[in-house]
Image (spheres, grey):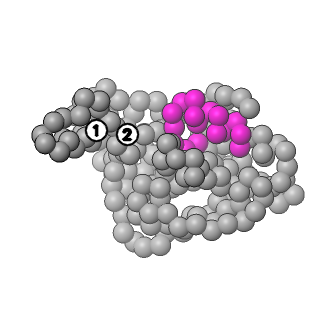
Amino acid sequence: MAILKVAQMGHPVLRQVAEEIPAKALKSSDIKALVDDLVETMSEYAGIGLAAPQVHFGVRLFIIQPDPGDESTLRVAVNPVLTPLSEEMEESWEGCLSLPDIHGMVPRYMRIRLDAWDASGEKYSVEFENFAARVAQHEADHLDGVLFIDRMTNLSTLAYGDEWRRYHAPRPEPKEGGEDEEEEEIEEGGKSC
């Protein structure tokens, strides 16, 4: 496994439409190796999602792990197709490893279905809602050359990380009995894909 270099906003690979992975390659060692490298790279940068174009591979593949503390939430999506399951959308904060330390409010569908192949070349279908749905949509956008800033409806919410943490990040709830938590936690919206 290797930690790969993450492309930053401005690199042409982030604006290209990724190519579908041929059926005969779905079970290849190259795809398995790329998945392993994506997982290692995402972990290194404390991300919750990573798309192949972000590490300079123009193929339709992404990984997500909406809960970094729970390996069971890790999902590999090869040649993914996302389908909204309702018209209901929600605007929330997003960040991106390719736009380091920048956050903005992005509208996303609240419920989606993901149809894709896993790292073993097996087809699956799964439904996501809320935060997991947001992460999957964010990563799927990378496969079409779309960054989260392209989805923003109000660019005035763009914020650098320090300012976002100071003024906009969700704050932890006080502990019962009125004691405040000593350690600041950053809620879902502050994690980067």
Mark 2 or mark 1, earlier in chain: 1
Task: Please identify the quarter of the rendering in which residue 111 is found.
Answer: bottom left
Determine the residue positioned at 37% across, 39% down.
Answer: 190
Q: Is the residue marked by circle 2 packed among few (<14), some (14-19), or many (20+) residues within 10 Å?
A: many
Determine the residue positioned at 49% across, 42% down.
Answer: 69
Determine the residue positioned at 57% across, 29% down.
Answer: 44
Instruction: Classify residue 65 as left or right of residue 52.
Output: left
List the single residue furthest toward the left: 178
> Residue 117 got which mark?
none
Foreground pick, 122 / 82: 122
**Is there any visible trace of residue 93 in the rendered image?**
yes
- The kind of residue tagged 2 is Gly
From the image, tell me which residue sits under label 1. Answer: 169
- On the image, the x and y values in percent for residue 2 come to 71, 29
- On the image, the x and y values in percent for residue 88 come to 36, 69
Task: Please identify the quarter of the rendering in which residue 179 is found.
Answer: top left
**Is there any visible trace of residue 139 in the rendered image?**
no
Q: Specify the segment rendered in magenta.
A: 35-50
Foreground pick, 157 / 173: 173
Q: In the structure shown, which secondary structural element does the residue marked by tag 2 occupy?
A: helix
- On the image, the x and y values in percent for residue 11 come to 59, 32
Q: Is the residue marked by circle 1 packed among few (<14), some (14-19), or many (20+) residues within 10 Å?
A: some
**Quadrant where the N terminus lies?**
top right
Are the residues flagged by discs 2 and 1 in contact, CB closer than 8 Å?
A: yes
- On the image, the x and y values in percent for residue 183 come to 29, 30
From the image, tell me which residue sits under label 2. Answer: 190
List the single residue furthest toward the bottom: 86
- The kind of residue tagged 1 is Ala
